[in-house]
Image (cartoon, helix red, strand yellow):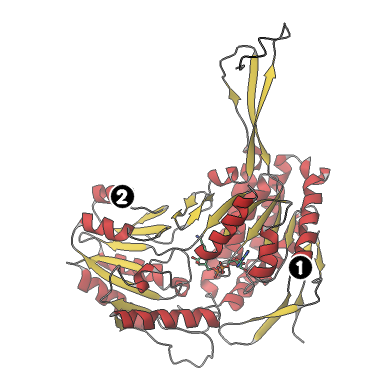
């Protein structure tokens, strides 16, 4: 019988109030993996109540920040000890390569160590106001119950980007993972209990976006929503948050340019293009899906990228030698196929790929694809495909390039390949994106803040700055003058 996974609420597994479960499938083999609880508003209500009770209980609210930090570091250690298990569970659930997931799991403890170290460094300031007799100081307080809604492409990493700073700042959390990848986030919650977090501090309700997700966002006891996913869903969540005046951090879609100047090391740049669009089968928000190559290096770059794209080893994501796994589920494959058809109908040429590969496995595989004869007017260049499809375009001047690269609704990331130091800094400044990589791509660290510009997001994840996303700032005024009260009709300072 297929294994059944329940919600995780108040430190224990809790069955769905509806009694309903849904199936998760391995996208490489199309075999059933497990059934997860189908959460609804009642389940969300239980989880938020557990999180609220934990937030108010002295075992969490009075815990010293240093001890909170230690719990985070314990959790980091446990993730490290269970890294291989977590990597395998995630790889079979979303089809990402085991080598990619091993890399992510190896990096994950660092997030908990980093934010664990910050837990007792969240401090206010003494403000030098105009009045000698007033002591004014600020303090940063946790918000309360934070909702974290995450996608399927890197479930634990993207959940961690939210909950590590949220917990370090003293909040409690309710996580709603993607319906495509429930398992590892449930395992993370169990590890949090094992690490010593009080019951109710970390809760997980599994289920669908329109049911469990929407119920979480609209729950009256939620203090903040932190979301990673599509721009379309993010917009809906932002409207709901705005209607209730709660904060939201949104990490959304992208259509990032990867730019190769005439003075670049073209062989390295070609590998950067491959990393940007074919790693993780292009299923990353930061995919370098728009490739701009200077006209003098365009042919060389195209040849190098195409040659490598055609030799990428496609297959079982659990095999160490595999370089490209399947797309995560049937709709993802259908979406990628339909975008390539749209591109061809718009006049694009399929220079490589453009079809499903011949494989022994039945899963949702799609060959690494290169589209040429494309420009910024086409949907394949404007819209996020979220698959292994690169659109490669020539440009002539730096000014033209900056215009083309910024001509997008998104602003998540950009890659720049050049040996010219002045150009690297100049173009990095002119690009309208929250993360710029020069002579590298897809580099990430818990210490380095990232923000989506334009339709790619609101607020900051990672780094010192993201701690502020999970606190509120209180300003406290103490009058130290015990003499007669001043004129009541004048503003005081
Ligand atoms: P999605 O928006 O479909 O779903 C994301 C999450 O939101 C899921 O848990 C889903 O169940 C939930 N959800 C859906 N509808 C909801 C609703 N009405 N109310 C509340 N929750 C709802 O996105 P996806 O397909 O899971 O993920 C892919 C998208 O995520 C891509 O656009 C990608 O660019 C983006 N992404 C962004 C980043 C980033 O850091 N900027 C990282 C990874 C992925």
Which residue bears the numbered disc 2? 430
Q: Secondary structure at mark 1?
A: strand
From this viewpoint, is residue 6 visible? yes
- Quadrant housing residue 267: bottom left
Q: Is residue 350 left or right of residue 321?
A: left
Residue at x 70%, y 45% (from the top left corner): 170
Q: Counting residues from the N terminus, which is met first, the one under dot 1 or under dot 2?
A: 1
Residue at x 64%, y 42% (from the top left corner): 471
Which residue bears the numbered disc 1? 7
The disc at residue 295 is none
Image height of 128 relative to 217, above or below: above
Residue at x 80%, y 60% (from the top left corner): 46
Q: Secondary structure at mark 2?
A: helix
Query: Which residue is outermost to the top?
Result: 483
Q: Position of residue 136 (x, y in %)?
A: 63, 22
Instruction: Answer yes or no: disc 1 within 8 Å of ligand 1.
Output: no
In this rendering, the count of numbered labels is 2
Q: Position of residue 379 (x, y in %)?
A: 36, 72
Residue at x 27%, y 56% (from the top left corner): 402
Query: Where, quadrant-wise, is the C terminus in this rendering?
Result: top right
Q: Position of residue 455 (x, y in %)?
A: 45, 58
């Amino acid at each position: 019988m297929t294994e059944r996974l329940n919600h995780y609420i108040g430190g224990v597994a809790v069955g769905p109030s509806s009694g309903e479960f849904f199936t998760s499938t391995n996208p490489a083999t199309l075999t059933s993996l497990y059934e997860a609880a189908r959460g609804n508003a009642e389940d969300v209500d239980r989880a938020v109540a557990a999180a609220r009770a934990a937030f108010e209980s002295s075992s969490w609210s009075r815990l010293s920040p240093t001890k909170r930090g230690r719990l985070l570091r314990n959790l980091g250690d446990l993730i490290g000890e269970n890294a291989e298990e977590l990597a395998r569970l995630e790889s079979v659930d979303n089809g990402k390569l085991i080598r990619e997931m091993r890399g992510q799991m190896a990096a994950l403890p660092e997030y908990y160590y980093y934010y664990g170290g910050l837990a007792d460094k969240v401090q206010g300031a003494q403000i030098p106001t105009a009045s000698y007799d007033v002591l004014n100081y600020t303090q940063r307080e946790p918000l309360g119950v934070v909702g974290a809604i995450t996608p399927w492409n890197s479930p634990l990493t993207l959940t961690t980007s939210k909950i590590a700073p949220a917990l370090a700042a003293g909040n409690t959390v309710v996580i709603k993972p993607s319906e495509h990848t429930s398992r590892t986030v449930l395992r993370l919650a169990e590890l949090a209990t094992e690490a010593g977090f009080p019951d109710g501090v970390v809760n997980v309700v599994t289920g669908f976006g329109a049911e469990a997700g929407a119920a979480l966002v609209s729950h009256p006891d939620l203090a903040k929503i932190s979301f990673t996913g599509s721009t379309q869903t993010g917009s809906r969540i932002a409207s709901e948050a705005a209607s209730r005046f709660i904060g939201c951090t949104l990490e959304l879609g992208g259509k990032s340019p990867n730019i190769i100047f005439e003075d670049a090391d073209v062989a390295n740049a070609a590998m950067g293009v491959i990393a940007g669009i074919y790693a993780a089968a292009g299923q990353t928000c930061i995919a370098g899906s728009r490739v701009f190559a200077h006209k003098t290096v365009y042919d060389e770059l195209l040849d190098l990228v195409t040659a490598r794209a055609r030799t990428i080893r496609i297959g079982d994501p659990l095999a160490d030698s595999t370089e490209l796994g399947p797309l995560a589920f049937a709709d993802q494959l259908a979406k990628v196929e339909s975008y390539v058809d749209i591109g061809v109908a718009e006049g694009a040429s399929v220079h490589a790929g453009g079809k499903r590969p011949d494989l022994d496995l039945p899963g949702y595989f799609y060959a690494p694809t290169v589209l040429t004869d494309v420009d910024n007017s086409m949907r394949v260049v404007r819209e996020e495909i979220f698959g292994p499809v690169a659109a490669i375009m020539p440009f002539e001047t730096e000014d033209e390039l900056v215009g083309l690269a910024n001509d997008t609704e998104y602003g998540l990331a950009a890659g720049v390949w050049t040996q010219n130091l002045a150009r690297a800094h100049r173009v990095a400044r002119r690009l309208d994106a929250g993360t710029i990589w020069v002579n590298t791509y897809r580099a990430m660290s818990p210490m380095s803040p990232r923000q989506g510009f334009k339709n790619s997001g609101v607020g900051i994840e990672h780094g010192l700055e993201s701690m502020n996303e999970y606190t509120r700032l209180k300003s406290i005024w103490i009058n130290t003058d015990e003499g007669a009260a001043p004129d009541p009709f004048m503003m005081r300072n």
